[in-house]
Amino acid sequence: MKRYITKIMVFGLAVSTIFSCSSDDKIVDQILEGVGTGAILRTRSETNNLVFNDVTRTFDAGSNYALTIEEQDEEEGALLESVEIFVAYRDNSGGEMTTQEVPLQTLMASDFTTGERGLPEASVSYTSDQLVSTTGITESMVVGKDRFEFRLVLNLTNGEVFSNNDVGGPVSGGSFFSAPFEYFPEVACSITESLAGTHTYVTSNIDSAPGAGGMCSGGNVMGTVTWTEVEPGEYSSSDMSFGQFEDCYTIRGPAAGEDITIVWDCTLLTPDGEVYLDEDGVVTPNDDNDDQEFTYSYTITNVTGPDMTIDFSSSAGDRGTVVITREGGADWPAIFTANN
């Protein structure tokens, strides 16, 4: 097996190069024949429908993860004996629910059918209830961006065994082979409420972009920002910089525009789109092809009740820290507390 692993890693790059120009399956067969014994589990399809509702603290009805794999070996699938599937849970929100992997299912050769490429193919699907039960986690403690981790082990009739440590990058993640032997579907979250409103803020630690000619006041900036819902989970903003841009560049206007939004993705707020400046350096809502442009990034550092603290910066180098108090003093959604 070691001899095969070394050769397939070397030949993997050649395969990747070949298939950037051609998808002729016969070339892959020829390469596999030339490297001795071995096998792969190629990803045919992957569907992640794992969605968690942070209000009900349960997975949405119908939440599941599905995978279709194809086995390929030097004898066109005749060496397939079984595929073992293991699963673990990864707590990415700072909790303590990460688990060790445990057996989930074993597929025997008889569980495979002949796919359209003439090779053994099998499909599996697991509900969120099955995955919660198998890993032994507490469902109510799940947070969006946590993930389940699957690992596959391929057993051949000649005694050889292959898994994620036995393949190189071009084979595990290449455009044709796509045979990683491991999968990491993230848990998405239901958008069950709106962040829209006119929120108050206090911005501190203000800095202007190097060489941009900004002269910041040096003090805290207070004001309001209006988030308007464009669609569930996506908002336009009246000022992406929470007063920093106007404070440091008094004639340029707030950092806003028609092409930028803030996307609420579970525990994150991600600015999307560019702020444009005309030839005089004044913010303009649209790009006229002659404008300067820059983007923003947000990092949530703390959420306590109605107060959310964000470190923000622009691609130009402007930066600051803002505490946003939600309109009406209402608490921010509980899912944001995963950032604490």
Image (tube, grey):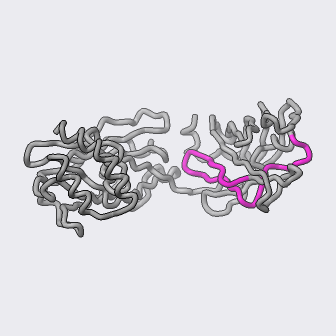
Q: Position of residue 115 (x, y in %)?
A: 22, 67
Q: Is residue 211 placed above or below 63 in the rendered structure?
A: above
Q: Which residues are magenta?
A: 249-274
Magenta region, main secondary structure: loop
Q: Is 257 part of what is drawn in magenta?
A: yes
Say whether residue 319 is visible: yes
Look at 86% across and 31% down and name the residue there.
219
Look at 65% across and 44% down and name the residue there.
331
Image quarter for residue 29?
A: bottom left
Q: Is residue 232 placed above or below 330 in the rendered structure?
A: below
122 and 294: which one is in front?
294
3 and 49: which one is in front?
3
Q: Is 166 part of what is drawn in magenta?
A: no
Look at 38% across and 59% down and name the residue there.
47
Q: Which image quarter is the C terminus in?
A: top right
Say whether residue 65 is visible: no
Of all residues, the one furthest to the bottom in this rendering is 116
Q: Position of residue 281 (x, y in %)?
A: 86, 49
Q: Position of residue 90 (x, y in %)?
A: 40, 39
